[in-house]
Image: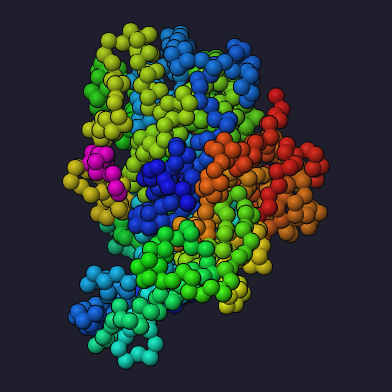
Amino acid sequence: MPQRGFPDTAFLNGARMSNLINLTIDGQPVTSPNGTTLLEAARQIGEVIPTICYHEHCTANGLCRLCVVEVEGARVLAPACVTPVAEGQNVKTRSERVLRSRRVILEMLHSTVDLSEAPEIMEFIQEYQAQPDRFPGAEPRSVPFLDDNPMFVRDYSQCVLCWRCVQVCADDAQYAFAINFKGRGYETQIATFFDQPLPATSCVFCGQCIGVCPTGALKPKREWLLEQDLSLDEILQMTQPERKKRRRPD
Amino acid sequence: MPEPDRIVSTTCPYCGVGCNLELHLKDDFVYRVTSPFDAVVNQGNLCVKGRFGYDFIYHPRRITTPLIRKQAQAAGARRQAFDLDEWQPVSWDEALDLVADRLVEIYRRDGPHALAVYCCAKATNEDNYLMQKMFRAVFRTNNVDHCTRLCHAGSVVALQQALGSSAMSNTAAEVIHSDCFIVTGSNTTENHPIISLQMKAAVQKHGARLIVIDPRRLELCDFADLWLPLKPGTNVPLFSAMAHVIINEGLVNQEFIDQRTEGFAEFKESLQKFTPEYAEMVSGVSRDLIVQAARMYATAERGAIYWGMGISQLSHGTASALSLIHLAFLTGHIGRQGTGLNPLRGQNNVQGASDMGAMPYHFPGYMLVDQPGNAERWEAAWNIEAGGLNRKRGLTTTEILSHAHPGGVRALYIMGENPMMSEPNLNRTRQHMQQLEFLVAQDLFINESGAFADVFLPAASWAEKEGTFTNTDRRVQRVRQALSPRGGSRPDWQIICDLAVRIEQRLGVTRSAFWDYQHPDQILSELSSVVPEYAGVKYPRIEKVGLQVPVWDDTHNGTPYLFGESFPRGRGKFHPLDYVPVVEMPDDEYPFILTTGRVLEHWHGGTMTRHSQLNTLYPEARLEINPVDAELMGVVDGQTLRVSSRRGSLVLRASVTNKITAGVVFIPFHFAEAAANLLTIDELDPQAKIPEFKACAVQIHAADEAELVDPQAKLERGRY
């Protein structure tokens, strides 16, 4: 059967695995099928590598770098979520260099992003003893709160740029391609093309982006209104405009 | 971030895909909906309706007290009452006693044929089973039907004739195993959104080839290898020409034809006339495209066909579906993984309601009412005297209303359906509704049909009751109660049981058919003790993952794809066909063909979605017109138009778009303010009795914006 369109990614889900790879993770021998990532291989021996941007049901892009591990002989740390296993690899998932790197990533995230509704990341901060005030001069990212459609709200000051929403909106699930990155560096943000309001884009309001968002950046509107301490009646009044009375010929 | 009081797993109430939902609740308020990523049906994906479209539960207009009309309605002068001022709130006792009194009065006076019921493809299997049981066991009538008549009746009859079964043959997710598939008469992206995701993945990630055959340039065409833009109602010549090519070029699977089918020689003879040149002339699709499509499908290793209402909703819907079935017979693309004949069922539980016997010719389990032996089985199951059940076929959905006159149907019970939006030629439907002597509506809202009723019984929504739905690929899945029924509303099955007992008392029945169920699982058990296909479907077995019927016994694990070894009727049967044009062809006076359908954000008659936030997102009907036609007619995007057919007329705004081919216009049928079915024609397929929703002739004129029922409602969407 001819493969067309997108590159063949079958090896990522283990569909094409003929030979086995032997490696060592944290001193333990591991045998994994070719194409397995270090993240998955570590899981085989019960080693859970922390992740933020990685999601089992999305394409991994190695963006957040929290999952970095030390591969002997490699110049830089390797993101475990996208690095495939290789024969004879010697991997350390908790070396001092790895821990320091994770700690700094968490400290930098905390200094610029509102993580108040990201309990998993807050747990990592505890676990890695990250210092929330490590970068006192950092400027927290503040972007306008977006309430441009009836279905959900977007608060990108809580966004950690994990890209999961972009992936599910694209070919991970929906093929709607309504959102992507805009800006560079510190100014990077998830946005629609030309910053159009969502209803004017190719968004189909499937809400898959909400389903994979690891923070409070994306929320159903009713959930957000509930947080504002509004009563059920008030919420309904705000979200269900009364239909015009029917005018009918008799 | 709110902490949920509880998270309830259930099944989506909208389309036939049957997505698994998790409702997050706080104080009986659903504030968030998610879906587990390991859900077999939808892998965590949802569409806008499943994710956000549940808030009709809480809508202030929802009826939660039984109502009776203040002013008595007389046959012939029945009027619609949308305002609560015209209704008297009453107790359940009072309402059910009145219903029982009137139904029994009419039954005693005119007999079983004077009563009829619309079951509901939105309600659970258990609700539907009980509703048909009440009318069959107590009132001895087979005037039982539901909206399957209006959507896939043509496909069902064709599949029954050709194979002896009528469900989707394969699992929807199997599409990734096809290497070529045809989507025809189905706007899958909007109507079965999650299946369309699987189709797109099949093309993009698994290298499948896609052929779209449809008068509209649907979003799926962006992913297709071929798009065949046929004129509405020319399926038979187009598919027959593909068959012609497949035979002529020797691309048939002769082994399959010899071993699994019959009638091939005669069929081959009948194809003489269907040359690609002839099909091009009739359908407007170039002969090259027809030949390419035929080759692509026939030479595939695993070819599948998915179709929707564009095939069945024609006055020759049965023939149209048969012409499609022939392609699978010729090539042997059926009975294996990744192949198959797949009518995409519309409603969440249309497959289930049909399985439950909510149809005039069939007891539950597709047992024909007039075939010896079937009635006896149900007489035994329902504790009825021998010979007690009616063995005469009843009236179909469309016939029930056209028989509403003295001597015909006098009383109608509507559970959750809205014929005043979904029937063709609504002006005539209105006259029929007015002729009824007694009308009961059991629903969430007073919709266009319920407004005609004498008694309104407030039902609990899907989130407020227990039960099961059977989705389009035959998977029986649990529906769970997430919150208490609003106000005084009650689950349908409880209303039916309560009413049936009252009716039996009035009739002096000594042998009750049994209505004392404590939980819906007892209802399903009663059904599965008689219907072999459901024999192994038990609540404890489907708590986590639904089973695909047939499930032959308690150890059988269900059936992902059908017809591996044989067809239920033995051999697949070829049917020689002729091309019969649609009833109303365009002419000088009515130059456009109108075709109808749905949009992503709304559901059918709109009883649910138009009482939801979804309506804010998509507040008005639009007429789709091709830029070429628009220029000829001097129509610009957003302009207000009056669209008229020989039967009715409506006013709405235009969307000028390439999504529709020239000569054809499209209106979605969800909007009461511009109800597309005012225009459609009430011509029926002679066998399936399905109306020709997909083609009638209309004319278009400029109109003033003030003529719109609701000029404020304005669609602001950028999507395809």
* B188 within the magenta span: no
x and y, in percent, of residue A117 in the image: 47, 58
- Looking at the picture, tell me which residue is in the foreground, B266 or A47: A47
Q: Give the side of residue A247 with respect to residue B431, left or right.
A: right
Q: Against A80, is B155 above or below?
A: above
To which quarter of the image does residue A70 belong? bottom left
> x, y (%) of residue A3?
42, 76
Residue B612 in sight here: no
**At 40% from the left edge and 47% from the top edge, which residue is drawn?**
B22
A34 left or right, relative to B229:
left
- The quadrant the C terminus of chain B occupies is bottom right
Residue at 24% over, 88% down: A88
Residue A154: x and y, percent?
57, 58
Query: Is residue B657 depicted above or below B545 in this figure?
Result: below
Image quarter of residue B584: top right
Q: Is residue B369 left or right of residue A205?
A: left
Q: Which residues are magenta?
A: B532-545
Check the image and report above or below for B649 versus B109: below
Closest to the observer: B316 or A226?
Answer: A226
Q: Is residue A142 visible?
A: yes
Locate residue A174, reporting x and y percent: 49, 61
B531 in relation to B509, above or below: below
Verify whether residue B536 appears in magenta. Answer: yes
